[in-house]
């Protein structure tokens, strides 16, 4: 276990620093690595601690080994695609530290579209086919808008917008009862900033500090999660929800690696390795057979909006896939995501994990560099059309059906946001971008 944990850390750091050195994207690769690490490396480190027992350590070690193969495959895809794009139109253009002048109203526009769609998701509109998917993807437009606002703000204002991004987890907790959605959105903004922030050592130090703060908040949230969700899901008044969350915020427990309760809360929800290891055991003992790509066919079908295919047989979520391939029975009201590592494994085995993640890595880099190139050219609309759909690939803990459905919704959201952008520019309500590469201030210092 210790060997796998150390190798993972080295490989993940290598991928991140490689992409930082390339400096042509919008942080999608870094965000993917952080997301994968949070579900497969973090909980595994607990089993290195001699005072923690947890679940079956052999299953966790097996799952971590398979996941590490996936990370290696992802790194291969990242490097190969990055090299292939070098010097081409996706990777050329202005230097990554040069930026066009973008009217702040453009960033606010995308935030506004995202907020409006996110608000629609909290109403009965979410039950309408395709409209619900479009609304669910609305938060991606808000993330894109926040990235624009942070990138082009004066140094004194950047901290303001970063603090605003830091509120995203609280917003999703208050409106949906989920922490993970807000954390995922925050990671996207932070990864975007990390793409051009200097100096790197300050970024690493800041990341370690924020990681400890996030862990402390996470274990406290998990302590009070049932009470918070009861208030949110029972549609309690806003004042009651705020009161519940306020009690949590005023009683945060500093993360203690020697506290079994804290370690258990991390292990309970962030240990995807255990499920991967159980799947390997279950299939190896003949209780299930490989899917041979059946779930990936469903993922391709999920790309088609339901409004165009009313009788579509697939729906978002992992369904009973985890139970089918692990034999573990879950409570009826418990939703367990299959995760990308496990889905590749149950379809094609270990080689499928390696090859599948190599493809994912290549695709993420391609979207990342296309979006980054258009942004540095001053074409915010085309950058949005590449960036928003790519965010769906970062759902490493869900199924590929989720990825397909979210990608379709995000593309629709991008079309809607960029159309509104174009209409307002033509109407003279907001000014268009200026010449690419026109730098108004030093972009590399927070």
Image: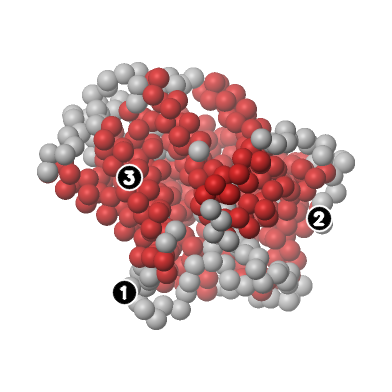
Residue toward you, 235 or 295:
235
Look at the image and tell me whether residue 275 can be seen: yes
Q: Earlier in the sequence, mark 3 or mark 2?
A: 2
The answer to whether 120 is drawn above or below residue 219 in the figure is below
Image quarter in which the N terminus is found = top right
Quadrant of res 256: top right
Q: Furthest-right residue in view?
A: 51
Residue at the spot of label 1: 308
Q: CA distance from mark 3 to mark 1?
A: 28 Å
Quadrant of res 55: bottom right
Whole-percent x, y for residue 283 in the image: 71, 71
Name the residue located 75 percent from the left edge and 66 percent from the top edge.
281
Q: Earlier in the sequence, mark 2 or mark 1?
A: 2
Q: Which mark is residue 55?
A: 2
Of helix, strand and loop, which one carries label 1? loop
Whole-percent x, y for residue 348 in the image: 59, 66
Q: Furthest-bottom residue in view?
A: 311
Name the residue located 65 percent from the left edge and 68 percent from the top edge.
333
Q: How is the image coloured?
A: secondary structure
Q: Earlier in the sequence, mark 3 or mark 1?
A: 3
Residue at the spot of label 3: 112
């Amino acid at each position: 276990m210790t060997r796998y944990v150390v190798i993972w850390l080295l490989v993940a750091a290598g991928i991140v620093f490689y992409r930082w050195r390339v400096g042509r994207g919008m942080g999608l690769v870094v965000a993917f690595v952080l997301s994968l690490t949070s579900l497969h490396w973090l909980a595994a480190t607990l089993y290195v601690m001699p005072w923690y027992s947890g679940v079956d350590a052999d299953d966790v070690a097996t799952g971590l080994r398979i996941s590490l193969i996936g990370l290696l495959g992802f790194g291969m895809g990242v490097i190969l695609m990055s090299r292939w794009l070098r010097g081409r139109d996706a990777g050329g253009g202005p230097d990554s530290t040069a930026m066009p002048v973008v009217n702040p109203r453009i960033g606010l526009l995308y935030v506004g579209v995202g907020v409006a769609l996110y608000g629609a998701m909290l109403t009965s509109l979410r039950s309408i086919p395709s409209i619900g998917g479009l609304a669910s993807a609305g938060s991606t437009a808000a993330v894109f808008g926040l990235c624009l606002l942070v990138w082009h703000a004066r140094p004194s204002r950047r901290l303001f917008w970063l603090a605003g991004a830091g509120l995203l987890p609280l917003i999703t907790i208050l409106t949906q009862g989920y922490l993970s959605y807000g954390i995922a959105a925050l990671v996207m903004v932070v990864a975007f900033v990390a793409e051009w922030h200097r100096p790197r050592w300050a970024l690493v130090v800041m990341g370690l500090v924020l990681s400890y703060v996030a862990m402390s908040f996470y274990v406290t949230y998990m302590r009070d999660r049932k009470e918070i969700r009861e208030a949110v899901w029972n549609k309690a008044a806003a004042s009651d929800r705020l009161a519940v969350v306020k009690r949590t915020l005023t009683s945060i427990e500093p993360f203690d690696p020697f506290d079994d309760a804290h370690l258990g809360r991390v292990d309970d929800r962030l240990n995807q390795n255990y499920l991967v290891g159980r799947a390997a055991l279950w299939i190896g003992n003949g209780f299930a057979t490989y899917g041979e790509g059946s779930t990936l066919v469903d993922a391709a079908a999920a790309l088609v909006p339901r409004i165009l295919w009313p009788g579509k047989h697939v729906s978002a979520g992992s369904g009973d896939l985890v139970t089918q391939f692990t034999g573990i029975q879950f409570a009826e009201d418990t939703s367990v995501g299959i995760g990308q590592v496990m889905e590749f494994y149950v379809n094609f085995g270990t080689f499928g994990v390696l090859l599948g993640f190599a493809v994912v890595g290549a695709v993420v880099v391609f979207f990342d560099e296309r979006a980054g190139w258009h942004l540095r050219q001053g074409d915010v609309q085309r950058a949005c059309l590449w960036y928003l759909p790519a965010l769906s690939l970062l759902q490493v803990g869900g199924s590929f059906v989720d990825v397909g459905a979210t990608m379709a919704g995000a593309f629709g959201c991008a079309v809607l946001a960029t159309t509104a952008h174009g209409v307002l520019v033509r109407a003279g309500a907001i000014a268009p971008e200026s010449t690419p590469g026109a730098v108004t201030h030093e972009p590399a210092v927070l």
